[in-house]
Amino acid sequence: MTTPPALLIAGHGTRDDAGAEAFRDFVRELGRRHPGLPVAGGFIELSPPPLGEAVTELVEQGVRRFAAVPLMLVSAGHAKGDIPAALAREKERHPGISYTYGRPLGPHPSLLNVLERRLEEALDGADRSEVTVLLVGRGSTDPDANAEVFKAARLLWEGRGYAGVETAFVSLAAPDVPSGLDRCVALGARRVVVLPYFLFTGILPDRVRQQTEEWAAAHPETEVRSADVIGPEPELLGLVMERYEEAVKGDLRMNCDSCVYRIALPGFEDKVGLPQQPHFHPDDDGHHHGHGHHHHGGHSHSHAH
């Protein structure tokens, strides 16, 4: 029986001790839940232990193969560049090791369910149809990473009955939190919940809360509440293992996580497993040269131009 590849968790790093400790706790909890699996975790920057130390820890346990999972909601510079570069360095430092690399975590339906729970806690029974959510991401110089936060916001809005879900960022990208709140009001929001799109507590989520409180103090006519970060929920532990399994099998997918034909999304449950018929767009010019792109798992769409 060959041992399964070890699990290496890669984190952003934070100057916040509580945030770094939350990450280390999370890694320990994963190890406890999967006793046969060597698990280690490290950071790209700012806090100990560094990723290289986590790799060394695994290698010293006799590990030769591992799957690295970025403990990150979106794929920005860290997930696209820094982690692969760090892993390539480790491969030179420890000849004979091999690794596969998993996908970032969001916007997975199980995380959207946790976000919905955080909103419910903040709302305390208020009617959703009167609530506008401001989802606040980390922010990046990478447009694709920022677009992922908008995607999460849209998926959170679909089928859940909130008045709207707007998006803002705490750093590097517009709109910032005060502008995001101004935007909600401009759209007619009377009651806003600011929802941090962050895994654990830290300097940036604290800043989101602080900026929200400052804005609220200056705008007493709008009811504003702050929701909590995602936190080390069972869904997050389960999702990391799902990303680990994907990486081990080399099963790197398209955006199947949020596919209505695979996953029961709120309000679209009847679509799961539906066979796909070619559909023609209303602006179709009559040239029916549909191209079906087959999505592994069964459903193909054919779009006519």
Image (cartoon, helix red, strand yellow):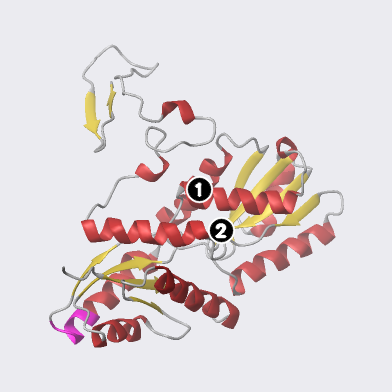
- Image quarter (top left, top right, bottom left or bottom right) of the C terminus: top left
Q: Say whether residue 168 is magenta.
A: no
Residue 272, percent from left and from top: 40, 30
The range drawn in magenta is: 90-95
Question: Disc 1 to disc 2, how far (Cα)?
Answer: 9 Å
Residue 186, percent from left and from top: 72, 42
Q: On the rendered structure, is 194 left or right of 80?
A: right
For residue 104, above or below residue 52 = above
For residue 43, above or below residue 212 = below
Taking the spot 58% from the left edge, 40% from the top edge, the residue there is: 157
| Residue nearest the viewer, comparing 14 with 161 | 161
Residue 91, percent from left and from top: 19, 79
Residue 197's label in the rendered image is 2
Q: Say whether residue 91 is magenta.
A: yes
Q: Which residue is most to the right?
A: 220
Circle 1 residue: 152
Task: Inspect the image, locate mark 1, and give the three-letter code of the amino acid beneath it.
Answer: Ala
